Image: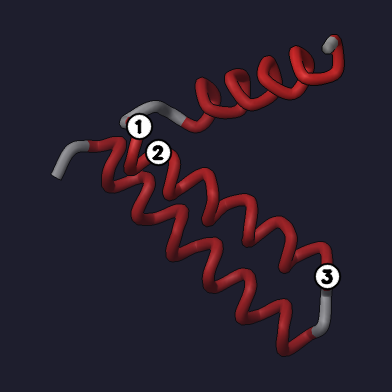
Amino acid sequence: MNTMRWKGNWNVVKGKVKQAVSRITEDERQFIEGKADEIFGRLQKRRGKNHQHLKRALHDSYRRSLCV
């Protein structure tokens, strides 16, 4: 398994754990953070890109959508 795929898998698991913990503690911030980690993990697995590259691409896409 390549490194990006492993990191992606890890981020999915980490995100799910944060979501489960947040449900117990009802801490919405942790739930949202966990969901973001899960989404980034899934993107890492599919695209084979690192976290920083994905954040930059999403940010650029968001900025372009504001300019339209």
Q: Which mark is residue 28?
A: 3
Indicate the position of residue 42 as horizontal and vertical percent values.
Answer: 42, 49
Indicate the position of residue 10 as horizontal and vertical percent values.
Answer: 39, 55
Real-space Cα separation, disc 2 to disc 1, in angstroms: 5 Å
Q: In the figure, 52 relative to 38: above or below?
A: above
Identify the residue shown where x is 45% and y is 48%: 41
Element marked by disc 3: helix
The reply to whether discs 2 and 3 touch (Cβ–Cβ < 8 Å) is no
Which residue in the structure is indicated by mark 2? 44
Determine the image quadrant of residue 17: bottom right
Q: Is residue 11 left or right of residue 6?
A: right
Q: In the figure, 53 relative to 27: above or below?
A: above
Real-space Cα separation, disc 2 to disc 3, in angstroms: 24 Å
Real-space Cα separation, disc 1 to disc 3, in angstroms: 28 Å
Indicate the position of residue 23 as horizontal and vertical percent values.
Answer: 72, 84
Mark with earlier residue (2, 3): 3
Identify the residue shown where x is 57% and y is 52%: 37
The quarter of the rendered structure image containing the C terminus is top right
The reply to whether discs 1 and 3 touch (Cβ–Cβ < 8 Å) is no
Which amino acid, mark 1? Answer: Arg
Determine the image quadrant of residue 65: top right
Determine the image quadrant of residue 67: top right
Q: In the figure, 63 relative to 27: above or below?
A: above
Q: Between residues 61 and 36, which one lies in front from this camera angle?
A: 61
Identify the residue shown where x is 63% and y is 73%: 19
Mark with earlier residue (1, 3): 3
Q: Between residues 35 and 3, which one lies in front from this camera angle?
A: 35
Which residue in the structure is indicated by mark 1? 47
Element marked by disc 1: helix
